[in-house]
Image (cartoon, rainbow, N blue to C red):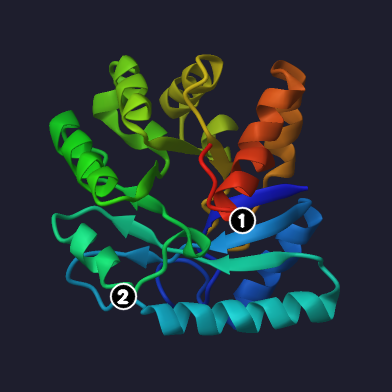
Amino acid sequence: MYIDLHNHILPGLDDGARDMKQSHEMLKIAYENHISVIVATPHNKANRHNPGKDTIEKYVAQLQEYADEQGYGIRLYSGTEFFYRSELTELLNQQEVCTMAGTSYVLVEFSPLDNYAYIRDGLYNLLAAGYRPIIAHIERYQCVMKDQRLVDELIDMGCFAQVNAGSILGKFGFHTKSDTKKLLKNGRVHFIASDAHNDKERAPELELCARKLYRIYAKAYIDDLLFQNAKKLLANEYI
């Protein structure tokens, strides 16, 4: 059973599920992929009408009720994927937005073209404020893929790296697949997630990816990436 920490399953809040019907279809796919926990992470970006904590929790509760009715055995939690900007720490401190399942962990993304100094300094600001940043789909950021030793520097600072299952399977091109493979080989990944946006080409699918990884790497390592590390996160424990 897998834990999916990056999922845009909530209806009508961002570029993820367009309505509740599609959210239900995504839940079904997650169940078929042996996903037992989903953290719903709608986008939060500057100069946008972003969903507040109450809205996110309302939709999570509605989906939880549906999942229970269907007997899926899936537990849903509230979260957010924050696009980094200078005022993010202040926004988090106001406690009107959702961290990852109410913990000190924060899922944060950057522009693929941001330079390393900007990414490093932004993550440092979050760490200094007492948060534990998870770098969303780290394989997308060109500056650290050119020299993956920089990923080690971010991890040593106290950050965590998440990669998308689709990147491992080559859904986003050869170079992204190659970069992600190198990250995995060198132990620079803490979480694998679906980053699902719909029930079609970007569905909440982890099973195929898991099968591939268990054939290549040690079982204990992949167990960590697919659920053990996430269990620690949900308990607000240090990984």
Which residue is under mark 1?
A: 203
Instruction: Report which quarter residue 21 is drawn in.
Output: bottom right
- The amino acid sitting under disc 2 is Asn
Q: Residue at x 74, y 57 (%)?
A: 36
Q: Is residue 1 among the parts visible in the rendering?
A: yes
The residue positioned 28% from the left and 18% from the top of the image is 146
Q: Residues within 10 Å of mark 1 (few under 14, many from 20)?
A: many
**Left/right of residue 238 with respect to residue 21 in the rendered view:** left
Going by the numbered disc 1, the residue's amino acid type is: Ala
Q: Which residue is mark 2?
A: 50
Residue drawn where x is 41% and y is 78% of the image = 53
Give residue 222's position: percent from left, percent from top.
68, 29
The answer to which quarter of the image holds residue 193 is: top right
Q: Is residue 188 above or below residue 56?
A: above
Task: Estimate the x, y position of residue 89 in percent, counting from the top left.
Answer: 22, 58
> What label sits on residue 28 in the rendered view?
none
